[in-house]
Image: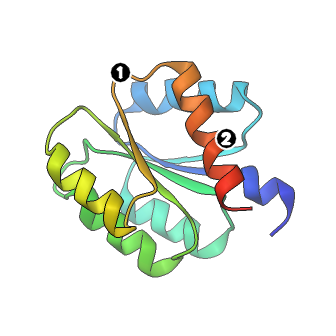
Amino acid sequence: MSESNQNRLLLIVEDPLVGSILQDQLQGLSYPVSLHPTPAEGLADLQQQSFGAILIDDKLTGTDVLKVAQDLMKAKPSVPRVVLTSGRNMEALTTARHSGLLFRYITKPWLRDELAMAVEKIGRAHV
């Protein structure tokens, strides 16, 4: 995978405002971003392109974020998955992290520095 693809991030965020803010923050940190409002669109992009990490918002209509993470892991097991969470179901997220389904989770509202450190840590752990 080229260095450009290692830095490229896949975002699955249904809320257009949250997606736009997150995309702007990550691009401001020099990460190329591919933003999708549905898991199906994100999965299709993942199957066609290489990414360094996947960030998934936990507020997705009609689906469970951990189910989405499982589908993404099946498609590309080596790409780390991060959930942005409002704090609901923390026990399930912790279990998913310990099982390897998630690389980590970030609570909302996130701080820009926290987001930057998380993405940098992913890059160092998966080079």
**What residue sits 15% from the left and 38% below the top?**
88
User: Quick check: 111 above or below 26?
Assistant: above
Q: Quadrant of residue 69?
A: bottom left
Is residue 92 toward the left or the right of residue 40 in the image? left
Q: Position of residue 79 (x, y in %)?
A: 57, 66
Q: Which mark is residue 33?
A: none
Give the secondary structure at mark 2.
Answer: helix
Q: Which quadrant: the N terminus?
A: bottom right
Q: Position of residue 92 (x, y in %)?
A: 18, 55
Q: Which residue is mark 2?
A: 120
**Image depth: mark 2 or mark 1 in front:** 2
Is residue 30 toward the left or the right of residue 16 in the image? right
Extreme residue in the bottom direction:
74
How is the structure coloured here?
A: rainbow
Front residue of 24 and 113: 113
**What residue sits 37% from the left and 54% below the top?**
38
- Inspect this view and state whether residue 8 appears: no
User: Quick check: 11 above or below 77?
Assistant: above
Q: Residues within 10 Å of mark 2 (few under 14, many from 20)?
A: few
Report the amino acid beneath label 2: Glu
Q: Which residue is mark 1?
A: 109
User: Quick check: 90 above or below 24?
Assistant: below
Report the amino acid beneath label 1: Pro
Q: Which quadrant: the C terminus?
A: bottom right
**What residue sits 52% from the left and 30% below the top?**
22
Q: Are marks 2 and 1 in contact (CB under 8 Å)?
A: no
Is residue 65 toward the left or the right of residue 71 in the image? left
